[in-house]
Amino acid sequence: MKARIKWVEDVMFVAESGSGHAIVLDGAPESGGRNMGMRPMELMALSVGSCSSYDVVTILKKARQQITSCEAEVTAQRVDATPAVFESIHLHFKVSGTELSAKQVERAIELSADKYCSASIMLKNAGVKVTHDFEIVEK
């Protein structure tokens, strides 16, 4: 895997992945930025949520669950020190579909957390408390 991060100005950067996709990262005005993009730690929290969401949707589809929607709300807490690393990350999944099995949704989340989601497992191994819960939303 390769990536490139290019400095634009002040504290703004453009990050480009090896697959050719790009995002803007920038700081808050009090840090010398113009608030034109995500912060690096926001991106890391989104990585955990999106990695796990991918797993959950894929596992539920393989289990023949009729899933129509999956949203993950990510809540991350950082330590009050330098470096301000993550102390905890909580993922709350809202899953919708037809006749979804709560047992299957729970299993999909557990498999992601314990076996498949490289992003959350990497952070757990570094001492971050990563937790999950879910609700099935009828639509």
Image (cartoon, rainbow, N blue to C red):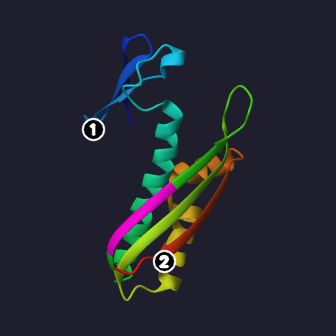
Magenta-colored span: 68-73
The residue labelled by disc 1 is 19
Seen at 45% across and 69% down, the residue is 94
Q: Quadrant of the N terminus?
A: top left
Closer to the chain start, of discs 2 and 1, is 1
Q: 10 Å neighbourhood of mark 2: few (<14), some, or many (≥20)?
A: many
Amino acid at dot 2: Val
The alpha-carbon separation of the residues under discs 2 and 1 comes to 31 Å
Seen at 39% across and 60% down, the residue is 54
> 20 or 25, which lies in front?
25
> In the rendering, at what x and y percent does residue 84 appear?
67, 31
Q: Is residue 52 visible?
A: no
Q: Is residue 7 above or below residue 16?
A: above
> In the rendering, at what x and y percent does residue 57 appear?
38, 68
Q: Residue furthest left?
A: 20
- Would you say 7 lies left or right of 32 here? left
Seen at 48% across and 53% down, the residue is 49
- SS under mark 2: helix
**71 is within the stretch colored magenta:** yes
Q: Tell me where residue 26 sits by quadrant.
A: top left
**Mark drawn on residue 105:** 2
Q: Are marks 2 and 1 in contact (CB under 8 Å)?
A: no
> In the rendering, at what x and y percent does residue 41 appear?
53, 35
> 69 or 125, which lies in front?
69
